[in-house]
Image: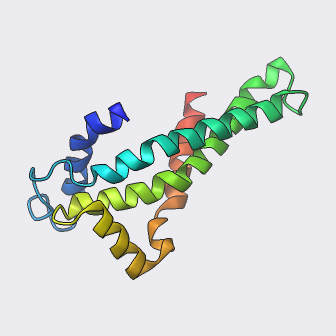
Amino acid sequence: MCVDLTLFPLDTIKTRLQSQQGFYKAGGFRGIYAGVPSAAVGSFPNAAAFFVTYDCTKSLLGAGGPLAAPHVAPVAHMLAASLGEIVACLIRVPTEVVKQRTQASPSSTSYQMLVTTLREEGVRGLYRGYASTALREVGETLHLF
């Protein structure tokens, strides 16, 4: 959570630079912490989902499982980390959607943006970009190994 909050202004600037409205119409440097509540609320559950999934999967694969041999242990770690990222994205993506939309529209609160997204797009709107985000996260995880 400390890293999320410390680097949040940089993320806001990046989001606004990428906004179709343009940097200044999306808020410029004003309200640089717009959207931080959604990031803060999602930070702990996101990390918890990853580590619980990672640890359980690693235990299942390694404890007498098909990948128990020491020479294939890295494969067990990669699979566990990949599954952990896929599960964590179930929390990360909705918080990112709300956060980014609030960053690009700083006159709205995170709660207002959540309600608007649900009203206009339903739950599916909160998962816009899930597949690409999950693939990116799994790719980054595999890169580490």
* Residue 43 horizontal/vertical position (percent): 43, 43
* Residue 115 horizontal/vertical position (percent): 36, 72
User: Vertical placement of 32 versus 50: above or below?
Assistant: below
* Residue 75 horizontal/vertical position (percent): 74, 31
Side of 58 relative to 14 (left or right): right
Work out whether residue 62 or residue 39 is closer to the camera in this orientation and state it: 39
Side of 143 relative to 72 (left or right): left
Q: Residue at x 34, y 38 (%)?
A: 4
User: Vertical placement of 80 versus 111: above or below?
Assistant: above
Q: How many marks?
A: 0
Q: Residue at x 26, y 34 (%)?
A: 6
Residue 27 quadrant: bottom left
Residue 64 quadrant: top right
Q: How is the image coloured?
A: rainbow
Q: Residue at x 17, y 68 (%)?
A: 21
In the rendered view of the protein, which quadrant contains the N terminus? top left
User: Vertical placement of 35 versus 76: above or below?
Assistant: below
Residue 65 quadrant: top right
* Residue 47 horizontal/vertical position (percent): 52, 39
Q: Residue at x 35, y 61 (%)?
A: 98
In the rendered view of the protein, which quadrant contains the C terminus? top right
- Outermost bottom residue: 120
